[in-house]
Image (cartoon, helix red, strand yellow):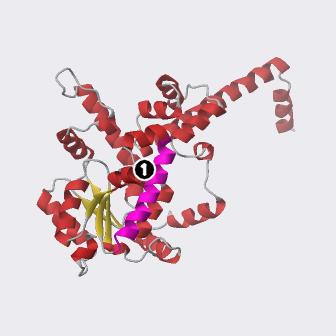
């Protein structure tokens, strides 16, 4: 009786009080929803390795609006969400959905209970059962993945020379496929168009280099599930890993700061604030992609290692080079 009486007392609130309470709850829920949506946009942008300026350019939305969205303050419309998702090369559902498909959730529930060794075994079983590694000659084709500054080009070129097989860069092959530069591809076709050319180039390279090849890939390829699955089905993938600080040092030494949109002073040197911002960008990108990079067949940590040491580590990490006809390999 006391519980019923207490409930009746609460139910005796005036219509104005109840309306105010409902509005307060709705506003709280709305703020929480916007904050969650902003976090998802920010996470997807980091995974793609895109700056806010790049996302604004590709989506047609302003940087200020995107900053408000990512901070949970933006008044977001369906159209702006669609434009943002399209620029990130995902669907609007990828931004909004909370959970994976039920069957996938059940599989993930099992996988979450496994340790690292068991996860590797599970990946091998799934790959063998469902065609993720069924391409003939896959282990002859080596693909190096990782963020810019890990040593992919330098180590890849030397590994190819050691094995007597061609060395190619996927970015150049994508340009060849499209018949234009990377900048023009992105300008004319956006991320979705770029990824289409990327998949075509991967299939062509796998077909043309059945005898073996060493290939470098763009740092964001692991963020595209379909493309990364395609890569893993035709190439033996190695993640070249380094610390954020070493990535930063090597990229600065190369004089190429495009991925980090850093600004430079009058003398061409990066300002301290820009350096810190760029380093934070690298940390965020690595954190968002670490689990994806870890899907590679092997990992080679180049941190605090000399070029000679890293090359030896890479040679040990890849399958033994088969005896090949060099003329056919370079044909």
Q: Is residue 90 left or right of residue 50?
A: right
What main secondary structure does the magenta stretch of the protein show?
A: helix
Q: Is 133 above or below relative to 61?
A: below
* 10 Å crowding of disc 1: few (<14), some (14-19), many (20+): some
Residue 203 drawn in magenta: yes
Residue 106: x and y in percent read 61, 64
- In terms of depth relative to the viewer, which is nearer, 30 or 128? 128
Point 86% across, 37% down: residue: 4
Q: Secondary structure at mark 1?
A: helix
Residue 290: x and y in percent read 38, 53
Residue 142 drawn in magenta: no
Q: Say if residue 280 shows up in the picture.
A: no
- In terms of depth relative to the viewer, which is nearer, 52 or 3? 52
Which segment did they paint magenta?
189-210
Point 53% across, 28% down: residue: 61
Q: Quadrant of the C terminus?
A: bottom left
Residue 81: x and y in percent read 60, 35
Q: Quarter of the image holding residue 110? A: bottom right
**Residue position marked by numbered label 1 in the rendering:** 178
- In terms of depth relative to the viewer, which is nearer, 100 or 190? 190
Residue 84: x and y in percent read 55, 36
Q: Is 108 above or below relative to 303?
A: below
């Amino acid at each position: 009786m006391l519980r019923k009486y207490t409930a009746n007392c609460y139910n005796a609130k005036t219509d104005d009080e109840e309306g105010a309470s409902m509005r307060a709850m709705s506003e709280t829920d709305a703020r929480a929803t916007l904050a969650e949506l902003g976090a998802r946009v920010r996470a997807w942008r980091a995974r793609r390795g895109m700056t806010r300026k790049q996302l604004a350019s590709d989506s047609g939305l302003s940087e200020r609006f995107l900053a408000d969205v990512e901070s949970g303050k933006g008044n977001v419309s369906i159209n702006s969400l669609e434009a943002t998702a399209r620029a990130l090369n995902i669907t609007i559902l990828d931004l909004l959905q909370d959970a994976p498909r039920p069957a996938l959730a059940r599989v993930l529930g099992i996988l979450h209970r496994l340790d690292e060794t068991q996860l590797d075994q599970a990946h091998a079983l799934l790959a063998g059962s469902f065609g993720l590694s069924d391409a003939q000659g896959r282990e002859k084709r080596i693909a190096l993945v990782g963020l810019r500054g890990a040593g992919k080009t330098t180590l890849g070129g030397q590994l190819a020379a050691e094995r007597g097989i061609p060395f190619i860069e996927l970015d150049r092959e994508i340009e060849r496929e499209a018949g234009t530069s990377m900048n023009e591809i992105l300008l004319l076709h956006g991320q979705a168009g770029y990824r289409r050319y990327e998949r075509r180039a991967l299939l062509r390279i796998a077909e043309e280099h059945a005898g073996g090849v060493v290939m470098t890939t763009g740092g964001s390829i692991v963020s595209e599930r379909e493309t990364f699955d395609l890569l893993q089905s035709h190439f033996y993938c190695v993640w070249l890993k380094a610390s954020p600080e070493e990535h930063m040092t090597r990229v600065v030494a190369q004089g190429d700061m495009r991925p980090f949109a850093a600004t430079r002073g009058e003398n061409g040197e990066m300002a301290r604030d820009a350096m810190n911002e760029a380093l934070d960008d690298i940390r965020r990108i690595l954190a968002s992609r670490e689990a994806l990079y870890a899907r590679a067949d092997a990992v080679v940590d180049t941190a605090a290692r000399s070029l000679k040491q890293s090359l030896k580590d890479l040679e040990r990490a890849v399958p033994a080079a088969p005896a090949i006809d060099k003329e056919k390999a370079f044909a």
